[in-house]
Image (tube, rainbow, N blue to C red):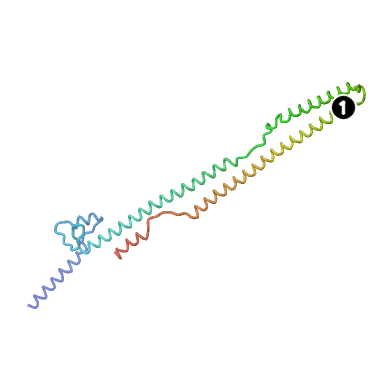
Amino acid sequence: MAFSNYAQSQNAATTNRAMMANYGKNRPTFSSLEELETYGKRPGATGTIPYKGGFLTGSEFRQKQELEKNALTTDYEAKYAEAKGANEARYADILGQYGTTVEGATARGPETLQFDESQFAGLGDQAKKDIAQSYTNLTAANTQNLVSSGLAGTTARGAVTAASARGRTRDTAALNESLRRERVGYSSDIDRFNASTRNAYSQYLDSLTAQKLSFMERREDDYPDQSIYLQQLEKFGNV
């Protein structure tokens, strides 16, 4: 009787060892949550953990958690890669815009003025004619007075002519000086304008460079919120 009980216990132990050895082999594995969900709804499911209208065993439930964890990680990595690609494209596009703007401004250069000599062509000619005509008329009038006074044959006539010539020379010289100053003033105005334009142009290029460097230094990219991902990951524990 004792031998029979011993034999039975040995047989039971052997059976248990065989079942344990085959447990890992017979336990199903799943590659997706959809596959596990279908398995849990199969007829005769022996699990005790409800899952989407079916039942899972503890082992199957842990597989579910692992699949969910992997899906969450895959989703985060995909969104991160997508955000990184968009950020890099935006960054390159903005730097390209800065480069295009600087290149265009450099190619154009500052907008300066050139001294235009034609602006003074004929300037003062009429005034010189008026001066000449005025002294010609004055000389004629003074000569006529001398004739009327009976002094036409005296040295007074020469003095009248000489005085008119001196006056004409004086007034013509004054006109030429006025024209010279106007020409110099015009040239100075152009020089001041060009200097101001070059300074503004230089400041503009400097500001573009400063903006570009500031953008590069303070680069701000948008990525998926990692804290939310970590919070969701915590619920799986050490799965």
Establish if 124 lies above or below 78.
above
Residue 35, position as x, y percentages in the image: 22, 55
Establish if 181 lies above or below 131.
below
Establish if 177 lies above or below 86.
above
Residue 156, position as x, y percentages in the image: 90, 26
* Residue denoted by label 1: 160
For residue 141, what is the image quadrant? top right
Q: Amino acid at mark 1?
A: Val
> Residue shown at 45%/54% (left/top)?
220
SS label for mark 1: helix
130 vs 73, nearest the viewer: 130
Mark 1 is surrounded, within 10 Å at the Cα level, by few (under 14), some (14 to 19) or many (20 or more) other residues, namely some
| Residue at the outermost right position | 154
Query: Which quadrant does the N terminus fall into?
Result: bottom left
For residue 152, what is the image quadrant? top right
236 vs 180, nearest the viewer: 180
| Residue at the outermost left position | 1
Query: Which quadrant does the C terminus fall into?
Result: bottom left
Residue 22, position as x, y percentages in the image: 19, 64
| Residue at the outermost front position | 149
> Residue shown at 79%/27% (left/top)?
134
Establish if 159 lies above or below 226.
above
Residue 158, position as x, y percentages in the image: 89, 26
